[in-house]
Image: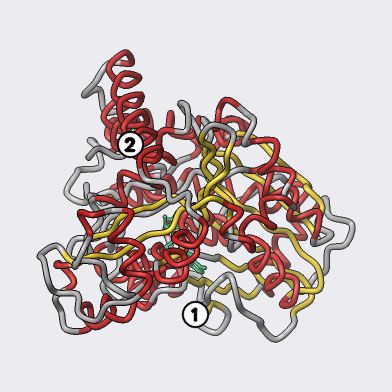
């Protein structure tokens, strides 16, 4: 099964035409929509039993992405071939732009304190952190900012964080040269932090930033079919018959509604035992749609979200709304840890008839395997980010399509040094290019990946 983003990537790599891109996207979305219609559980008691026994969608994401066998712990090392992300493909230009943006927003904040902590969240391998910090520590920015930037260079603390164990090792590798070059050993810490639940010793001012972290945080997809709203739960089952042992009301309810799963439905405990025994390849996953009136907690959240209410009516969302579950806990954690600050979040929003999200909510669950896990991410709704920020008494200080922000700082492209080009080459697996080859290579690389900026937004909240 193709994923929305892979189709898009093929298009930008010139492997497919625009017409073909639209045709394939529509096909993926139609297939997912047909599946959704055919896999609802309408009867109240069966729906309650199934939702109590199965994974919620966000629990399934948690397992698939962050369990020891999950995508971010096991599969992904952010090497050039594994997951092309803007901070890497546009390195160091991207990090430099975000560094300048952060300065611009910090210096125009009337609540700013002089004691500043930069905090990268969901840092992955730390491409953004590397380039943002290196730019701040090295490059002459706007002359009017000179005194303040010099002070920040001398005094700022840097925290670079991610929730996975794997990232801790990758971050150590990626950030070593920045730490050494700028003598930051005592001021830069790499930490394991879950952005949705942390509390640091309270600091006066934080400049918190994260690229593509929101889309890998827990989501509950809300699907509308014939004006009825549904949540998605995920039933684990055994690939081969008769692995599942004890019967339960939950399993009976699944088997009655979906006869193909009779005798194969797994409880969450059984799934866990198979995973612990190393036989996780036997587990398959089936997304099932449960009416929101059988999911009262989720129903209440949807009711209280005006972003969800209005975007479920917005044709761009094609009747699927990605309700973010981690956003408010993340904003609260940041608030607890800093008296004031700004939060810069960069992520992608639904595009091309929400194909990607339809695909993630349905198709990519059907072919998910913990033996070879893939990404489970949702293009996010910035209206929800704004709404939840306002509930937490945060102000939207900046909101822009990413391509416009990069355009604002495009003069940086004329200042790239040989060292910058070598940095790009190293980050993208072209370490063997000669100095003479680098300018053309980086220009070509940037021209392939810059168009992806069309699908990203940048938001800055202040508090
Ligand atoms: C798509 S990657 C982006 C990595 C990096 N920001 C970049 O752009 O190169 C998403 C990262 O967010 C991290 N992440 C997701 N949820 C998180 C959370 N609640 N707390 C901390 N990190 C999280 C994942 O572990 C992963 O490294």
Quadrant of the rendered image containing residue 239: bottom left
Does residue 157 sit above or below 229 in this rendering? below
**Disc 1 or disc 2, which is closer to the eye?**
1
Q: Characterize the local packing of mark 2: few (<14), some (14-19) or many (20 or more) Cα atoms within 10 angstroms.
A: many
Can residue 5 be seen here? yes
Residue 312 is situated, as x and y percent measured from the top left of the image, at 62, 36
- Sequence-earlier tag: 1 or 2: 1
Does residue 112 sit above or below 191 in this rendering? above
Q: How is the image coloured?
A: secondary structure
Residue 27 is situated, as x and y percent measured from the top left of the image, at 30, 25
Residue 448 is situated, as x and y percent measured from the top left of the image, at 34, 30
**Residue linked to disc 1:** 191
Residue found at the far top of this picture: 19
**Residue linked to disc 2:** 442
Can residue 411 be seen here? no
Kindly identify which numbered label has been placed on residue 220. none
Residue found at the far right of this picture: 110
Residue 182 is situated, as x and y percent measured from the top left of the image, at 51, 70
Q: Residue at x 73, y 59 (%)?
A: 342
Q: Residue at x 21, y 62 (%)?
A: 262
Please tell me whether mark 2 sits on a helix, a strand or a loop.
helix
Quadrant of the rendered image containing residue 116: bottom right
Please tell me whether mark 1 sits on a helix, a strand or a loop.
strand
Q: CA distance from mark 1 to mark 2?
A: 32 Å
Q: Nearer the viewer, residue 347 or 351?
A: 351
Q: Residue at x 41, y 42 (%)?
A: 90
Q: Residue at x 75, y 55 (%)?
A: 389
Name the quarter showing ligand 1: bottom left
Q: Nearer the viewer, residue 166 or 79?
A: 166
């Amino acid at each position: 099964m193709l994923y929305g983003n892979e189709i898009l990537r093929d298009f930008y790599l010139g492997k497919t035409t625009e017409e073909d891109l639209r045709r394939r996207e529509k096909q993926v979305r139609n297939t997912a929509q047909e599946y959704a219609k055919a896999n609802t559980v309408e009867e109240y008691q069966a729906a309650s039993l199934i939702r109590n026994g199965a994974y919620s969608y966000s629990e399934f994401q948690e397992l698939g992405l962050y369990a020891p066998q999950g995508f971010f712990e096991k599969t992904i090392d952010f090497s050039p071939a594994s997951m092309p992300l803007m901070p890497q493909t546009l390195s160091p230009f991207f990090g430099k732009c975000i560094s300048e943006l952060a300065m611009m927003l910090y210096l125009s904040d009337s609540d700013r304190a002089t004691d500043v902590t930069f905090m990268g969240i969901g840092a992955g391998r730390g491409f953004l952190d590397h380039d943002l910090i290196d730019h701040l520590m090295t490059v002459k920015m706007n002359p009017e900012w000179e005194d303040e930037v010099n002070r920040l260079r001398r005094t700022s603390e840097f925290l670079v964080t991610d929730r996975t164990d794997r990232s801790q090792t990758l971050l150590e590798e990626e950030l070593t040269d920045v730490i050494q070059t700028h003598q930051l050993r005592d001021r830069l810490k790499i930490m394991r932090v879950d952005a949705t639940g942390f509390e640091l010793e309270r600091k006066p001012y934080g400049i918190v930033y994260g690229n593509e972290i929101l889309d890998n945080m827990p989501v509950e997809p809300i699907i509308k079919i014939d004006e009825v709203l549904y949540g998605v739960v995920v039933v684990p089952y055994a690939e081969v018959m008769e692995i599942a042992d004890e019967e339960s009301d939950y399993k009976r309810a699944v088997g009655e509604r979906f006869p193909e799963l009779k005798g194969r439905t797994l409880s969450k405990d059984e799934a866990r035992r198979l995973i612990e025994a190393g036989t996780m390849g036997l587990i398959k996953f089936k997304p099932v749609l449960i009416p929101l009136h059988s999911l009262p907690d989720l129903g209440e959240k949807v009711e209280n979200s005006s972003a969800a209410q209005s975007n479920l009516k917005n044709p761009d969302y094609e009747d699927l709304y990605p309700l973010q579950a981690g956003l408010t806990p993340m904003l609260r954690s940041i608030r607890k840890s800093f008296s004031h600050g700004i939060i810069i979040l960069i992520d992608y929003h639904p595009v091309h008839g929400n194909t990607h999200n339809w695909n993630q909510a349905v198709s990519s669950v059907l072919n998910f395997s913990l033996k070879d896990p893939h990404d489970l991410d949702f293009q996010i709704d910035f209206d929800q980010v704004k709404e939840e920020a306002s509930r937490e008494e945060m102000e939207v200080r900046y909101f822009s399509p990413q391509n416009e922000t990069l355009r604002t700082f495009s003069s940086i492209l004329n200042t790239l040094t040989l060292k910058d080009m070598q940095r790009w080459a190293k980050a993208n697996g072209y370490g063997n290019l000669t100095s003479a080859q680098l300018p053309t290579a980086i220009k070509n690389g940037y021209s392939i990946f810059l168009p992806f900026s069309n699908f990203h937004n940048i938001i800055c909240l202040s508090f």
